[in-house]
Amino acid sequence: MSFALWPEYSVVLGVFATMFAIMLPKGRGIAAYWVTLATLAAAFMATWTDWTSGRLPILLYAHGVSIDAFSLVINGLVILAAAGALLIGWNDRRYGADFPVLVLLALLGMMVLGLANNFLVLFVGIELLSLPLYIMAASRGTHQSGEAGLKYLLLGAFSSGILLFGLALLYGASGTLTFTQLAPAHMVLPLAGAGLALTVVGLVFKLGIVPFHMWIPDVYEGSPLPVTTYMAFGTKVGAAAILMRFLFFGFALATGWWGPALGYLAVLTMVVGNLLALAQKDMKRLLAYSGIANAGYLLVGIASHNMVGARALLFYLLVYGLAVLAVFAIIAFVAGDRESIQLDDLKGLAARSPWLAAFLAIAMLSLAGIPLTGGFVGKFYLIQAALQASQPGLAIGLVVGAMVGLAAYIRPLQRAFQKADGDAGPASAVRWPVAGAVVLVVAVVGTIGLGVYPSPIVHIVNHSAAFYWLH
Amino acid sequence: MIPLNWVVGLGAALFAIGAVGVMVRKNPLIMFMAAEMMWNAAALVFVAYARSFHAMSGQVMAFIIIGTAAAEVGIGLAIIVSVFHHRHRLDIDEVSQLRG
């Protein structure tokens, strides 16, 4: 038992406490949400204590678990994602009583992915992240929700199978399960190549990179709104973190094996994801394709395999997550009892709720990468990383993707600032649930803050990426 | 003693059969079963290599895979049954209200 693992322990304890809170005879429901929120606060405090303790990095369990500045930043990001999802779905009976417990379990999986340093921990983390999300995707009990859960389950099991077989071949090629002991120079070559290819395919399946992205729009559209929020932010953080840690720790000395391949995938993903986002009519589907395109941006940070890339990836994860939280909070407000909205439902939003329309504009422009928003700074760092790695093709792909993306993100804004159709349309203001409003305001303030004064966060991610590199 | 490469070859064959099964079959139950077969192929390869290295780590991994597969089957069957309750027929092509 190590004190450095308190963020994870507090989530485990929180899972049990939340289960008991659900079983309380009186005040059913709401107590569980408060316990979950307290657990998230405790996990964040523990992460902060670790960060300031000055004893990092700490290697535990025969180097299977590595608590360092990188894992702690990932902890912070996924706690933010979990808090956002929890508050957007605050005390909503539609998602079942178990919703807070499942949020915490998936959070634990994401945290484990941040600190994994061997195949066992990697696999347990991936499954701990996926299994609760399968249930959450299907938790609504409607046709669409069941279909989303089924598709997610089948594709998830399939990609985990590919990942596992890749890990098995890598184990055969190297004789070890620990990333840092893989030593690619001494591996049996065809075996190692096949193993690495299958492992990377399994991981980019989870991240949603283009040839392996077809499940994402269907699953995002069918899942309940807070769950989609969680998937769009949290799972992307987890998958990006483990992909980066696996490749940078295990194959840092053989970047030629994976760097170019990931670079091509990144360019393909950025362009195709944004192009497909152009054609969408449903807001959740639009954000699903936007999530695919953003996974491509994240892959730029990994493919450039340098410290600037690691820093840019961590920074971009935060920027992307804040924008996603803001947009999903707005969709939840406008949708009300429904699970999603069409682009046309946004018509007249500026007249009904000017603030909401303004916030939507800020979040969308941040996703598109307009200056004065965090999205611009994040993309700037990614381009810097690509150029520093002397891969201008990645930078060009990113700019082209962002241009196409701008057109895709302008469409909902154009609807929002349009006059409503004359015949119907409720002219009343959109209702702001308190919990969702907290998420929205924090996300929008964060987006603007990162755009005009990014240095505190840059300082943190610099520290994180540097520690990571010197391991 | 069976040579290592035969066991790994068997694992690869099982993996390929599973992967083809997921992509070709239409029934979610069969697809799920095929995916589980891919997991088991990986577990077999882990055990085979662990035996040849005289190491325990691969065997532990196989146990973890089996345990996780059990959890996944529990959740997976529950989801498949709940979808079946809605439609009374299982065909992945019919479960396509979401435009995919």
Image (cartoon, coloured by chain):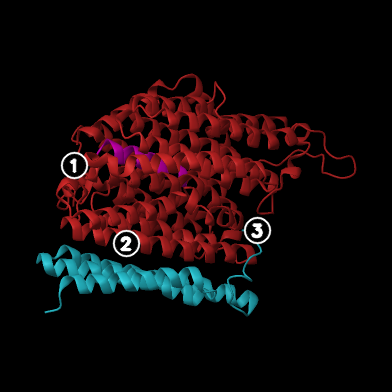
Chain colours: A red, B cyan
Whether labels 1 and 2 share one chain: yes
Residue that mark 3 sits on: B99
Does A29 appear in magenta? no
Asked if residue A67 can be seen in this view, the reply is: no
Q: Of the numbered discs in the image, which one, if any, rests on residue A164?
A: 2
What subunit carries mark 2? A
Q: Nearer the viewer, mark 3 or mark 1?
A: 3
Residue B13 pos. (x, y %): 32, 72
Q: Secondary structure at mark 1?
A: strand
Residue A436 pos. (x, y %): 59, 42
Q: Residue at x 33, y 53 (%)?
A: A197
Residue A61 pos. (x, y %): 17, 53
Quadrant in the picture for residue A21: bottom left
**Residue A76 vs residue A324, the one in the foreground:** A324
Instruction: Give left or right: position of A236 versus B7.
Output: right
Region of the chain picked out in magenta, as a range:
A67-82
Identified by mark 2, the residue type is Leu
Instruction: Give left or right: position of B26 versus A14.
Output: right
> Which quarter of the rendering shows the C terminus of chain B?
bottom right
Does residue B72 sit above or below A166 in this rendering?
Answer: below
Seen from this angle, which residue lies furthest front? A190
What subunit carries mark 1? A
Residue that mark 1 sits on: A58
Quadrant in the picture for residue A359: top right
Q: Main secondary structure of the magenta part?
A: helix
Does residue A23 sit above or below A457 in this rendering?
Answer: below
Identified by mark 3, the residue type is Arg
